[in-house]
Amino acid sequence: MTALEGHVLTPNGFIKGRLTFDGSRIGAVNGSPVDEASVRESALPIIVPGFVDLHVHGGGGADVMDGGEATAVVAQTHVRTGTTLMLATTMTAPASDLSAAFSGVAQAIAVASAASAARAAAHIFGVHLEGPYISEERLGAQPNFTRHLAMEELQALNAISPIRLVTLAPESSGNLEAIPALVAAGYKVQLGHSNASYEQTKAALDAGAAGFTHLYNAMSALQHRQPGMVGAALAHGEHAEIIVDLLHIHPGAIRAAMRSISGLYCVTDSTAAANMPDGEYQLGRQRVTRCMGGVRLADGTLAGSVLTMDQAFRNLVQHLDLSLVEASRRTSTLAADYIGAADRGRISVGAFADVVVLDRNLMLTDVFAQGVAVAHSA
Ligand SMILES: [Zn+2]
């Protein structure tokens, strides 16, 4: 039976004590409360919930769009940097490419259910369908295979692997009207890759859209007489994902979003080049280059990231001055709650034993996914 000792972050704050696993679940958490300043000064291990990443395209040289074994490789890569729950994220692509990617995700979910120490992986909760129902004016790094939303296409894909998030542009023909039906069918709608006005975005929220996809990036910006999608998100949004590689967004804009959106949570938007050396990689159907801490198309457009969640956590604490408690919420608990995974993203009895152990410099020393020790990369 695995037992860990140190400073354990529970839903009620840090305790100095002991965490015991019961198989794949947390069996017991015992200790006495301790304040965060003492935790930071101490050399004891810092034990926090495993990270939750709802926007993962790739890692370890593999991309979800490659289909086949690729998603399994992605999940096995990201768990080594502390991600214990993820959504495999697809790109705008022809229908046949999407169904091949979904089949790969189904295969990865099957592999993971037979997890062992040798093949430990992030739990794949399902798919984030990013496009194809987005604006061709706000593609970012997505290739232009945008098309009209079709419920039949969604249902067919969902039958292969469960869709947990759908990113769409509300101003594209028919999309705003489709939101209530999507929500009624159980899909969570996020707004992004969009040129929508403030008014169109507000209407989409009123229609049931739940959040925003990589806030600020690939969406209409805030101007003081034309607040755009960013303005609507800051004024009305309750949930949004944000990329904190400190390359996609200025820290000041991240701070503004944190003050405005209570449910703001971190994603990596990571590509095949995550956890890999500099060089050329494939992102969906596009060639991208990893260099200088980023991934770009030939014209310099940022094309996803090489961010990992452990680095996101460190960026929040070391560059944005968040407390460990707040950084953990924004890299784990908020996203788990948003997606309806109530037994993930927290260290409490009965929850899955998804745990990250950090040293005082916040570097990973151990990762456990559903109680299985992972050979981590730090
Ligand atoms: Zn995107």
Image (cartoon, grey):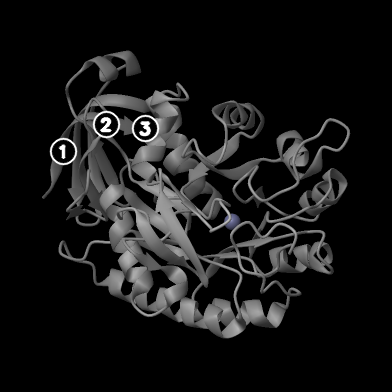
Instruction: Classify residue 29 by image quadrant.
Output: top left
Residue type at the position of mark 2: Val
User: Viewer-proximal residue, 15 or 75?
Assistant: 75
Q: Is residue 354 visible?
A: no
- On the question of residue 147 being in view, the answer is yes
Seen at 27% across and 31% down, the residue is 8
Taking 375 as reference, is 124 above or below it? below
What's the amino acid at mark 3?
Arg
* SS state under label 2: strand
Q: Nearer the viewer, mark 3 or mark 2?
A: 3
Q: Amino acid at mark 1?
A: Leu
Residue 312: x and y, percent?
Answer: 41, 39
Q: Please, what secondary structure does the residue beneath circle 3 have?
A: helix
- Disc 3: CA contacts within 10 A as few (<14), some (14-19) or many (>=20): some
- Pointers 2 and 1 in contact (C-beta within 8 Å): yes
Q: Residue at x 60, y 82 (%)?
A: 95
- Residue at image mark 1: 4
Which residue is the site of mark 2?
Answer: 8
Q: Which residue position is annotated with label 3?
A: 314
Residue appearing at x 76%, y 69% in the figure: 181
* Front residue of 22 and 14: 14
Left or right: residue 108 compared with residue 316: left
**Residue lying farthest to the bottom in this orientation:** 96
Spatial CA span between label 3 and label 2? 17 Å
Corner quadrant of residue 148: bottom right
Sequence-wise, the earlier of marks 3 and 2 is: 2
